[in-house]
Image: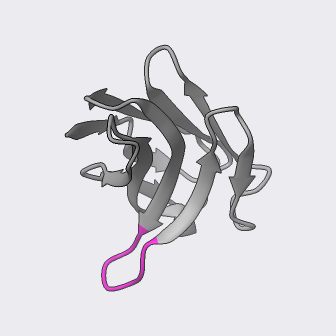
Amino acid sequence: QVQLVESGGGLVQAGGSLRLSCAASGRFNRLNVMAWYRQAPGKQRDLVATITSSGSTDYAASVTGRFTISRDNAKNTAYLQMNSLKPEDTDVYYCKVVVTTSDYVNNNYWGQGTQVTVSS
């Protein structure tokens, strides 16, 4: 089993910055892709950014140039640096990881979500 602990959400004014963290713990052979999603009430969960174990990144068009995803493999932790925040970035942000178990099976795990609120 894998546990994810997210932190760093909060209330910020438009133009401000926040940094989210997602720490993975538990039993796994390999921590593969780490990703951030976001979801507003009643809407689908949308992909924000991904990072592979080798550090390759990808971003949604709406956050490109403002958000940066990174990871510390020694700490099994992913980060999402969010700059130039806009009110439309207000959502619950979720971390997702893909791990390879000792049986060489890939499983997905989700964090509990952290609220980000951007005031205008």
- Farthest-out residue, front: 103
- Farthest-out residue, top: 74
Q: Whole-percent x and y of residue 9?
A: 37, 43
Q: Is residue 16 above or below residue 110?
A: above
| Colouring method of the image | one colour
What residue appears at the point 36 percent right and 30 percent down from the top-left corner?
23
Q: Is residue 29 above or below residue 61?
A: above
- Front residue of 99/50: it is 99
- Farthest-out residue, bottom: 42
Q: Is residue 21 above or below residue 47?
A: above
What residue appears at the point 69 percent right and 32 percent down from the top-left corner?
54
What residue appears at the point 31 percent right and 78 percent down from the top-left corner?
41
| Residue 114 visible somewhere in the drawing | yes
- From the viewer's perspective, tell me whether residue 23 is left or right of residue 13: left
- From the viewer's perspective, tell me whether residue 39 is left or right of residue 52: left
- From the viewer's perspective, tell me whether residue 67 is left or right of residue 97: right
- Farthest-out residue, left: 1
Q: Quadrant of the N terminus?
A: top left
Q: Quadrant of residue 44?
A: bottom left
Q: Is residue 54 above or below residue 13?
A: above
What residue appears at the point 24 percent right and 51 percent down from the top-left corner?
112
Is residue 42 part of the magenta span, yes or no?
A: yes
Tell me the chief SS of the magenta region. loop
Q: Quadrant of residue 101?
A: top left
Q: Whole-percent x and y of residue 53?
A: 61, 34
Is residue 10 part of the magenta span, yes or no?
A: no
Q: Whole-percent x and y of residue 111?
A: 29, 48
- Front residue of 38/106: it is 106
Q: Which residues are magenta?
A: 39-45
Q: Whole-percent x and y of residue 89?
A: 54, 62
- Front residue of 116/47: it is 47
Q: Quadrant of residue 28?
A: top left
